[in-house]
């Protein structure tokens, strides 16, 4: 089982396997995880989505909010194995055996570093494959791909990537550094899934 929700306390459900790319949670009967007996749950309350880079929880405009580890979800919230998810009065533990986000060594909730405008643009392009469900997320964008989409030289991209590695504390060289940077940036909120979707939808590119 790739990922699942384990009910805690009075959660009115058994083990819930997350077998779809999008699992909806709500009081409505048509929700994938229906919590009909909980009056504090909205009809379509929240959704858990699978991306090649990991799992993300999104509140769907619920009346009472969705919470991860006691914090209210605003926008998209990456999930890590062992996170506590609360929907209404129902509490679940999220478990995942393969999500890339689980493997990060950074402290959950640590704020992202301050970035320049260009560093942020490079980071968005680096992370772009995270929202592409049509391909396995084996690697982030290459230096050449970032350079082509931002209309800048590859040497400039490498310069900004080196700065980003330093700012995110990824000091050890290696093939996995760009992947670690992409996952850490998403986890710490340096880039959002909304930004990545917009970049993928628009085809990228910005003013140098």
Image (spheres, rainbow, N blue to C red):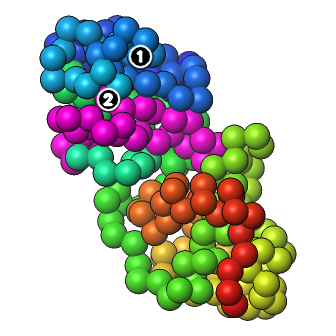
Q: In which quarter of the image is residue 83?
A: top left
How would you rate the neighbour count of disc 2 (Cα within 10 Å): few for under 14, some for 14-19, many for 20 or more? many
How would you rate the neighbour count of disc 1 (Cα within 10 Å): few for under 14, some for 14-19, many for 20 or more? some
Whole-Å distance between the Cαs marked 2 and 1?
9 Å
Residue at 74% over, 50% down:
138
Q: Tell me which numbered mark, 2 or 1, is placed earlier along the sequence.
A: 1
Say left or right for 25 vs 7.
right
Q: Quadrant of residue 197?
A: bottom right
The reply to whether residue 108 is visible in this rendering is: yes
Q: Specify whether residue 57 is painted magenta.
A: yes
Q: Name the residue under label 2.
A: 45
Q: Nearer the viewer, residue 206 or 4?
A: 206
Q: Specify whether residue 121 is painted magenta.
A: no
Q: Mark 1 points at which residue?
A: 31
Residue at 45% over, 57% down:
187
The reply to whether residue 69 is visible in this rendering is: no
- Give the magenta part as a residue range: 45-71
Residue at 67% over, 69% down:
125
Q: Is mark 2 on a helix, strand or loop?
A: loop
Marks 2/1 in contact by CB < 8 Å: the verdict is: yes
């Amino acid at each position: 089982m790739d990922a699942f929700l384990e009910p805690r306390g009075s959660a009115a459900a058994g083990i819930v396997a997350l077998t779809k790319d999008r699992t909806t949670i709500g009081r409505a009967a048509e929700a994938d995880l229906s919590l009909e007996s909980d009056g504090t749950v909205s009809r379509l309350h929240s959704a858990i989505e699978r991306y090649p880079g990991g799992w993300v929880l999104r509140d769907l405009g619920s009346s009472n909010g969705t919470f991860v580890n006691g914090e209210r979800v605003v926008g998209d919230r990456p999930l890590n194995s062992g996170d506590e998810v609360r929907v209404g009065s129902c509490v679940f533990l999220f478990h995942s055996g393969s999500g890339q986000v689980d493997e990060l060594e950074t402290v959950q909730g640590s704020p992202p570093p301050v970035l320049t405008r260009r560093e942020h643009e490079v980071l968005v392009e680096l992370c772009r494959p995270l929202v592409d469900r049509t391909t396995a997320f084996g690697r982030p964008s290459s230096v050449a791909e970032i350079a082509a989409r931002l209309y800048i030289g590859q040497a400039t991209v490498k310069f900004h990537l080196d700065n980003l590695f330093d700012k995110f504390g990824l000091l050890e060289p290696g093939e996995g550094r760009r992947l670690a940077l992409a996952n850490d940036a998403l986890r710490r909120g340096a880039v959002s899934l909304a930004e990545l979707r917009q970049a993928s939808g628009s085809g990228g590119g910005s003013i140098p």
